[in-house]
Amino acid sequence: MNDIIERLAELSDLMMNDQPYNDSDFTDIDEAICEIRRLREERETYFNAHDALLAQTIELRSQRDEARREVCDLKTFNFENTISAYRYADLRKWDCYKENTNG
């Protein structure tokens, strides 16, 4: 058996059924502890990367929406105010005038 989970399950069965086991079997527990620690650290790294990307995404959307609003304002000026900036954004299917846009 190579998988740590299978080895620990086998050790647990031996212990629960009062069957003989070797002290060397407990090295599997040490290995499992190390693996759990490694996975927790890896998980934390992924969570931190996710949080950083989420913050960057929010910032980039904010910048995108600001740029879209500027385009709408300029187009409104070019249309000699015959169309509002909000209407132009709606025609482009932009939601840059809504709070907390996701698209």
Image: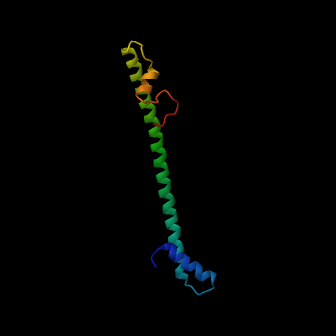
Q: Residue furthest top?
A: 80
Q: How is the image coloured?
A: rainbow
Q: Is residue 101 above or below residue 40?
A: above
**x and y percentages locating residue 89 in the rendered image:** 43, 25
Q: Is residue 3 above or below residue 85?
A: below
Q: Nearer the viewer, residue 80 or 23?
A: 80
Quarter of the image for the C terminus: give it.
top left
Q: Residue at x 47, y 57 (%)?
A: 42
**x and y percentages locating residue 71 in the rendered image:** 38, 23
Q: Quadrant of residue 65?
A: top left
Q: Is residue 72 above or below residue 3?
A: above
**x and y percentages locating residue 87 in the rendered image:** 45, 22
Q: Residue at x 63, y 85 (%)?
A: 18
Q: Is residue 17 above or below residue 80?
A: below
Q: Nearer the viewer, residue 101 or 63?
A: 101
Q: Nearer the viewer, residue 96 or 89?
A: 89
Q: Residue at x 54, y 75 (%)?
A: 8
Q: Is residue 19 left or right of residue 48?
A: right
Q: Residue furthest bottom?
A: 20
Q: Nearer the viewer, residue 51 or 66?
A: 66
Tell me if I can see residue 98 in this picture: yes
